[in-house]
Amino acid sequence: MSEAPKSQTPSYTMTPIGVVHSCFEEKFAVPRQPGLVPSATGSIELLEPFNHPDIVDGLENCSHIWVQFIFHECADKGWQMKVRPPRLGGNKKMGVLATRATHRPNSLGLSVVKLERIETKHQKVILHIQGQDLVEGTPVLDIKPYIPYADIVEQAEYPFAQHKPNTLVVTFSSKALSQLEKSENEASLKTLIIEVLQQDPKPAFHKPNQEREYGAKLSGKNIKWRYLEDIIEVTAID
């Protein structure tokens, strides 16, 4: 009996160069695309031996950067040939490579984010970013400059996502407003909550249900909300 042929595909080992610190403390309610929540702040802390100022020399001239990362919360859950994209209502299936789903063959993600500033002190190199869609603890594999003339394709088409999704109205209960007033960062937290929730973070196959309450951790707060038809009401900020 002849032996089965060995795979000719080479394998590679990649070492994370950094880790993300994010206002999103869990995967639920993270925006489905970067840039949808402009007030979503975070940072990328470079790890040894990559935490040297020389490695980012010149990057401060960039307004935006590409971040290649690992979907670490999904990496051990396997991947799927077909997935249900939220933009299609969570009911229609498409090939995973035709989507930006997290359950991918190699669990790799790619985001373009705004680079606010680079901090280099106390043997640390930290990139402060904005408009990000990365969860706390995300391992970063690579960072590249965003180059407008090369990265913008004016004629690009994708019929399922040609335009930004419609946003919902977000309101606050009297209880939530009272709790919000006690926060040190009241204004910025309120803006973050509105920008996140107006993207409708519930699973696409869920129908609005006044009796069902959702929750997510944002910037150290446990945010709870419910749906009133096409309006979201924040019920508590603990």
Image (spheres, helix red, strand yellow):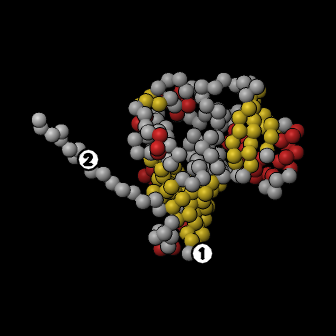
Q: Earlier in the sequence, mark 1 or mark 2?
A: 2
Q: Position of residue 150 (x, y in %)?
A: 43, 52
Q: Residue at x 40, y 45 (%)?
A: 106
The residue wearing badge 1 is: 121
- Residue 147, visible in the rendered structure: no
- Residue 34, visible in the rendered structure: yes
User: Is 172 on the left-hand or right-hand side of 36?
Assistant: right
Contact check, label 1 and label 2, Cβ < 8 Å: no
Q: Position of residue 113 (x, y in %)?
A: 56, 53
Mark 1 or 2: in front is 2
Q: Residue at x 54, y 53 (%)?
A: 138
Secondary structure state at the residue bearing disc 2: loop
Q: Residues within 10 Å of mark 2 (few under 14, many from 20)?
A: few
Q: Residues within 10 Å of mark 1 (few under 14, many from 20)?
A: few
Q: Nearer the viewer, residue 34 or 23?
A: 23
Image quadrant assignment for residue 141: bottom left
Q: Position of residue 164 (x, y in %)?
A: 59, 36
Image quadrant assignment for residue 201: top right
Say which amino acid is labelled 1. Lys
Q: Position of residue 63 (x, y in %)?
A: 56, 59
Say which amino acid is labelled 2. Thr
Q: CA distance from mark 1 to mark 2?
A: 42 Å
The residue wearing badge 2 is: 9
Vertical comparison of 23 with 96: above or below: below
Secondary structure state at the residue bearing disc 1: strand
